Image (cartoon, helix red, strand yellow):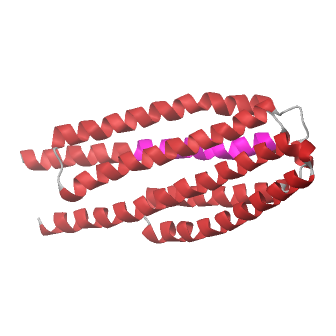
Amino acid sequence: MSQDEHTLKRFDIELTSIRSHILEMGGLVEMQFKQAMQALRKSNAYLARNIIDQDQRVNRLEVEIDALCCNAIACYKPKASDLRLLVTATKIIVHLEHIGNEAKKIAHMTERRAQQCLLAMPRFSAINHASELTQTILKDVLDSYARIDPESARKAIERNDSVKVECDSILHHLIEFMSENPHTISTSLEYFLITKAIERIGDHGKFIAELVIESSNRYHDIQHDQALA
């Protein structure tokens, strides 16, 4: 094996490791979001606290992945499609970290209000439905990244439109409800913030899907270049 072939093989191993770490981080934030909504439904302060504590693991993974990308750039000095794959990876982990932050916000609000009957508030079923749609989008986006499947990523982008429509409807009704029932403003505002968190998670999922599409194009460029070499 020539020196160039050996270097290329090592670089491929580094890329595989980075992808594996990203999928681990993605699985963690996906679980955070799912459990945050479970904690909200059950008014479970203990589960909410566990979700908040898990955020440290997400942050550590982001730092580790960023370091792996920087090390790969420094050691192998990749060009063109190779370099863009690494840049895309650094962008994806930023969106994943933001998703974890939004899940943590939901958990914080659940922990503060665990003793109150949030389920009796209007629009909760709609909020739950919006969160389920968003969880599906996030799962599909991560699957599309694992399989380098741009078509699945495009479908996830399209589905995010449904989440935005759902969230807009919830926010409209919450504003009306607060106007008619001033004594519920505090709780209603927290539902408002939870809905916005769900909407932002959907948006970050959409942005990751767009990056998956870009990276799939670059991945195929690399395969084409290697075939010609």
Horizontal side of residue 194 vs 91, given as left or right: right
| Predominant secondary structure, magenta span | helix
| Residue 70 x, y percent position in the rendering | 27, 38
Q: How many marks?
A: 0
Q: Where on the picture, by quarter, is residue 13?
A: top left
The answer to whether residue 28 is above or below residue 161 is above
Q: Is residue 119 magenta?
A: no
Q: Is residue 29 magenta?
A: yes
Q: Quadrant of the C terminus?
A: bottom left
Q: Residue at x 31, y 49 (%)?
A: 87
Q: Residue at x 77, y 55 (%)?
A: 127
| Residue 170 x, y percent position in the rendering | 77, 60
Q: Where on the picture, by quarter, is residue 139?
A: bottom right
| Residue 207 x, y percent position in the rendering | 48, 58
Horizontal side of residue 4 vs 138, given as left or right: left
The answer to whether residue 171 is above or below residue 151 is above
The answer to whether residue 169 is above or below residue 73 is below
Q: Residue at x 60, y 52 (%)?
A: 200
One can see residue 198 in this view: yes
One can see residue 1 in this view: no
- Judging depth in this view, the residue of 218 and 109 nearest the camera is 109
Q: Residue at x 38, y 38 (%)?
A: 65
Judged from this view, the residue extending furthest toward the left is 2
| Residue 173 x, y percent position in the rendering | 82, 60
Residue range corresponding to the magenta coloring: 19-40
Horizontal side of residue 33 vs 111, given as left or right: left
- Judging depth in this view, the residue of 115 and 188 nearest the camera is 188
